[in-house]
Amino acid sequence: MLGIKNIKTYEEWTSIFNPTSTYIGNWKKDSKIYFVGTDKNGKKGGMVSEIAENIPFKFVSIRHYGILDGDKEIIEGAKVEKWTGGFENYYFDENNGLTTVTIEVDAMEDFIDFFKNTFPKALNKLKEIIEK
């Protein structure tokens, strides 16, 4: 559903966050995965993460533990200390053919308004894709 089996689905719904959003890696439990995009200056950046849990059609948990600055992984120090250890959890509840997605995000104070405004738009995009 999130684009776990089809990267194009992921790229389409997460384009709301960044038009160049993608991931590098896989969604298997304990796997390292990069969530990346390109900024307005053409520089690659993103999050260094781990799939903490993946129970198909039920639950996906992503633990963020660093950032990607160009090709450089930063996993310690002041630049990432507020972000390290944050989780992004997706719960899927299917009832009578209708799936409800609930998301929990540990977000730094600086990003709360961004997520509150952007996540609903991204989820509407995901809904459009799934209902095609």
Image (tube, rainbow, N blue to C red):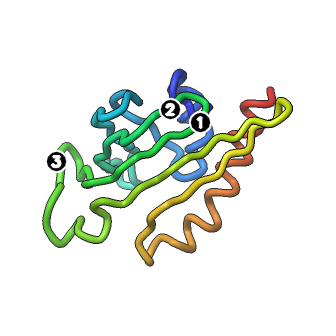
**For the residues bearing labels 2 and 1, Cβ distance under 8 angstroms:** yes
Nearer the N terminus, badge 3 or badge 1?
1
| Residue at 54%, 53% in the rendered image | 17
The residue where tag 2 is placed is 55
Q: Is residue 63 left or right of residue 124?
A: left
Marking on residue 102: none
Where is residue 122? Give x, y as percent.
65, 49
Name the residue type under label 2: Ile
Give me the C-alpha separation between circle 2 and circle 3. 31 Å
Mark 2 vs 3, N-terminal side:
2
Q: In the rendered image, which quarter is residue 28 located in?
A: top left
Name the foreground residue: 32 vs 94.
94
69 or 28, nearer to the observer: 28
Name the image quarter holding the C terminus: top right
**In which quadrant of the rendered image does the N terminus lie?**
top right
Mark 3 neighbour class, 10 Å CA radius: few under 14, some 14 to 19, many 20 or more: few
> Helix, strand or loop at disc 2?
strand
Q: Height in image: 89 above or below 23? A: below
Give the number of the mark in front: 2 or 3.
2
Question: Residue 80 at what x, y percent from top left?
Answer: 24, 65
Q: CA distance from mark 3 to mark 1?
A: 33 Å
Which residue is under mark 3? 72
All told, the count of numbered labels is: 3
